[in-house]
Amino acid sequence: VAHLLRLDVDGAYIGSLTVAPGVDARAVTDLVAGATRRRRALDYALTTLAARPVDALAPALRAVLRAGLHELAGGAPAHSANEYVTLARSTGGAGAAGIANAVLRRAGEVVAATGALPAPNAPSPSATPNRAALRALAIRASHPDWMVRRWVSRYGWEAAVALMDANNAAPHFCVRAADGASSAELAATLAAAGATVRPSNLLPDEFVVVDRGMACVRPLLTAGAAAAQDDAAAAVVA
């Protein structure tokens, strides 16, 4: 939440954020990056659930609620809202905690009933894209209106939606086996250490995607047994 607050108030960049020793840096980065990518959609849901403009909320409370809504939308259990209510109390007192409790409880109910946070009605791809439809799509996809208008005009509705979905997808972390070792051997080593891994879709014989267990990767990087590299960048020159 402190990182989201810095992004909101101080204009910090996600890449400049650091975490304290012992904190799961990957989990924090995923939460901050995810809530930032989906910020426009989260703010629409927040405005709807809180029945007030987002800017009317204190910055610290906005950060708490964005993080909480992002986690609920991602499938976190409803009781996870309790942690964010406690955070709201610690940053803004009883009043902030009351707002957080009301908003997040309601959000949990909506997600349980519909599978998603409140959002504008989904425009029909077959309809002629007017300004209202394009704005609704922009909010749902958390992209600027001007970009959505340009992409739909240039590439068509379905291709534009696919581009926005790709932009909103969480990035994955890849490692490449050192010279002389296979990706299967690297995957087996990481799995034995407790990591959750899978072959790269692009270069399965060379790269391993690490979904969970980043702490297991660091010793291999330090020892030179693996190297961190993006598989998409490597595929361009493969």
Image (spheres, rainbow, N blue to C red):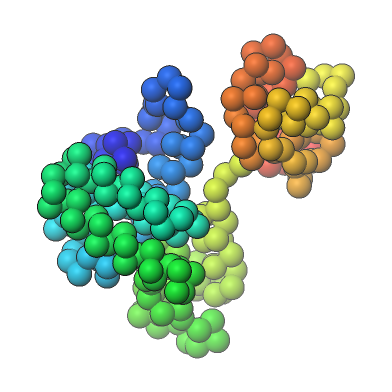
Where does residue 179 sit, x and y in percent of width and height? 82, 19
Residue, far top:
223
Q: Residue at x 22, y 65 (%)?
A: 50
- Within the image, what quadrant is residue 211 found in? top right
Where does residue 207 sit, x and y in percent of width and height? 76, 34
Where does residue 96 sit, x and y in percent of width and height? 16, 51
The answer to which of 235 and 44 lies nearer the viewer is 44
Q: Is residue 173 left or right of residue 207?
A: left
Residue 119 visible within the image: yes
Where does residue 196 sit, x and y in percent of width and height? 69, 37
The answer to which of 39 and 159 lies nearer the viewer is 39
- Within the image, what quadrant is residue 162 found in? bottom right
Q: Residue at x 41, y 58 (%)?
A: 78
Against 190, is 120 above or below? below
Q: Is residue 196 left or right of residue 81?
A: right
The answer to which of 193 and 229 lies nearer the viewer is 193
Against 37, is 229 above or below? above
Q: Residue at x 27, y 49 (%)?
A: 85
Q: Residue at x 84, y 32 (%)?
A: 184
- The quadrant of the rendering that contains the N terminus is top left
